[in-house]
Image (cartoon, rainbow, N blue to C red):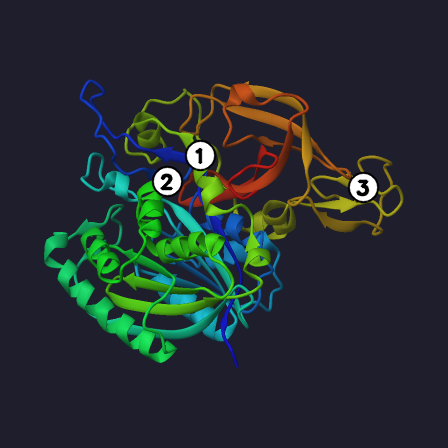
């Protein structure tokens, strides 16, 4: 029996940061790295939903991250609800820097679905601030339509290299000069065993992910990699638990059928995977390629980034904070809140949103309506206004009313687009985002992004 990847998708946020100078009069660092930045209304849950929306989820759902929105609550259940998966689906959170490779391994060998997502922050001005980025990648395990797993090997080492205490926001990092050699040694053992098991002396593509940049460079050089994976990393930063998945997705985007791929993840030891690219690799990708998403990103200023992450305390409008949602109504209205479900009238066929017992079009009440999800439908803006008193970390946002193809109307926020660029008639599609967080509760719902959005919608 063969194991491998049947489908995959990657998600890169719409923003990139390449300048973290607090003093703009100082010269910019030439040729420095670029950081992939999740928007203020994104987190690892919303990025996971975006990546997985392009795939047919099968088996248990595994969510790997170092930065979950809740500490003691399972984040994968929110993803499960937003995707509308059956209650029989098992969901599991995996935590830690090595969790991405572990989730991928479990998905490959059990037919599960793994989504790897992370948001990376450092203290402002940290030496590696621009080298830590945000991303998500998802993989559906199976018989290997996209890539067949030829071999897999692991080498575990207890190493205090990158860690974070409960309640802290930023990783603590030991000097990478003192931990790189240990990670390189672990990777060497894992790679040797994996290549021996696969019966190969060399591969067509080498992909190296490591929480230690010095170790990654040494491993790439030793394996004679082309540097394509390093180029992607310089454009995104190290994306934590998502990084081995992001680099693997970028490689599968370009690899030809029959070629071999060695994926090495060196974090708290090392994991090595050897794949042979399948005939169905082009059909297996969901959403836009990593290359296209990189090319379509918007530049972000450092001040705006600091506001988004709450690293710069800025006086907002004199307006009360939004009320926190309560658990019982969130549960009762889960279909509307998480899956954007409306009720389709059995008499006239029109869609009422939010769903109700009485049709908003013909006024007929009864049980003849059916639930329909609008999250995958296109819509057009019919009204737009600017909110300058928002409690979000933005000076103003666009509030829109949209009509969906096939019926249904939604009033909501536009996102990933400058408010002044939103116009009546603009085609948009829904995206799952965080509205706000109040009293320790994250309020998730659907916003609108321009249609044919290059970042996976």
The residue most toward the left is 178
Q: Residue at x 53, y 69 (%)?
A: 144
Residue 37's spot in the image, x, y percent? 38, 38
Q: Is residue 451 above or below residue 194?
A: above
Residue closer to the observer: 67 or 50:
50
- Outermost residue to the bottom: 1
**What residue did someone put label 1 on?**
297
Label 2 or label 3, whichever lies nearer to me, is: 2
Earlier residue among tags 3 and 1 = 1
Number of the label disc, if any, that sits on residue 235: none
Residue 126: image location, x then y, percent: 19, 39
Nearest to N terminus: mark 2 or mark 3: 2
Residue under circle 2?
36
x, y (%) of residue 99?
A: 35, 63
| Residue 358 tag number | 3
Cβ–Cβ under 8 Å for marks 2 and 1:
yes
Q: CA distance from mark 3 to mark 1?
A: 43 Å
Q: Residue at (49%, 59%) from the top-left corner? A: 256
Helix, strand or loop at disc 3? loop
Q: Counting residues from the N terminus, which is met first, the one under dot 2 or under dot 1?
A: 2
């Amino acid at each position: 029996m063969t194991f491998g990847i049947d489908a995959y998708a990657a998600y890169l946020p719409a923003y990139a940061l390449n300048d973290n100078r607090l003093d703009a009069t100082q010269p910019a660092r030439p040729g420095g790295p670029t950081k992939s930045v999740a928007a203020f209304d994104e987190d690892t849950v919303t990025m996971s939903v975006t990546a997985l929306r392009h795939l047919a989820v099968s088996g248990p759902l595994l969510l790997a991250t170092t930065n979950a929105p809740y500490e003691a609550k399972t984040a994968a259940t929110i993803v499960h609800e937003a995707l509308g998966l059956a209650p029989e689906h098992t969901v599991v959170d995996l935590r830690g820097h090595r969790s991405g490779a572990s989730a991928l391994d479990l998905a490959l060998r059990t037919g599960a679905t793994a989504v790897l997502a992370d948001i990376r922050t450092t203290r402002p001005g940290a030496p590696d601030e621009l080298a830590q980025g945000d991303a998500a990648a998802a993989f559906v395990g199976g018989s290997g339509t996209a890539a067949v797993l030829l071999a897999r090997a692991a080498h575990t080492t207890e190493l205090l290299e990158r860690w974070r205490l409960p309640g802290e926001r930023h990783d603590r990092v030991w000097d990478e000069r003192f931990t790189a050699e240990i990670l390189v040694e672990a990777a060497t053992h894992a790679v040797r065993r994996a290549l021996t098991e696969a019966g190969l002396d060399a591969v067509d593509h080498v992909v190296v992910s490591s929480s230690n940049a010095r170790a990654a460079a040494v491993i790439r050089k030793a394996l004679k990699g082309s540097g394509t994976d390093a180029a992607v990393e310089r454009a995104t930063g190290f994306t934590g638990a998502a990084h081995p998945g992001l680099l693997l997705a970028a490689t599968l985007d370009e690899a030809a059928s029959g070629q071999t791929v060695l994926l090495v993840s060196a974090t708290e030891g090392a994991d090595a995977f050897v794949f042979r690219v399948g005939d169905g690799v082009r059909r297996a990708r969901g959403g836009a390629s990593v290359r296209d998403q990189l090319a379509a990103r918007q530049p972000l200023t450092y001040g705006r980034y600091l506001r988004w992450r709450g690293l710069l305390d800025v006086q907002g409008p004199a307006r009360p904070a939004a009320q926190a949602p309560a658990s019982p109504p969130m549960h009762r209205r889960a279909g509307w809140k998480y899956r954007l479900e409306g009720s389709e009238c059995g008499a006239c066929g029109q869609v009422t949103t939010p769903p109700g017992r009485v049709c908003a079009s013909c006024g007929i009440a009864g049980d003849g309506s059916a639930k329909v999800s609008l999250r995958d439908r296109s819509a057009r803006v019919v009204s737009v206004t600017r909110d300058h008193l928002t409690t979000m970390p933005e000076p103003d946002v666009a509030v829109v009313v949209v009509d969906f193809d096939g019926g249904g109307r939604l009033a909501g926020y536009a996102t990933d687009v400058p408010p002044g660029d939103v116009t009546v008639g603009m085609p948009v599609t829904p995206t799952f985002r965080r509205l706000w967080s109040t009293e320790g509760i994250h309020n998730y719902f659907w916003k609108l992004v321009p249609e044919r959005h290059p970042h996976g919608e």
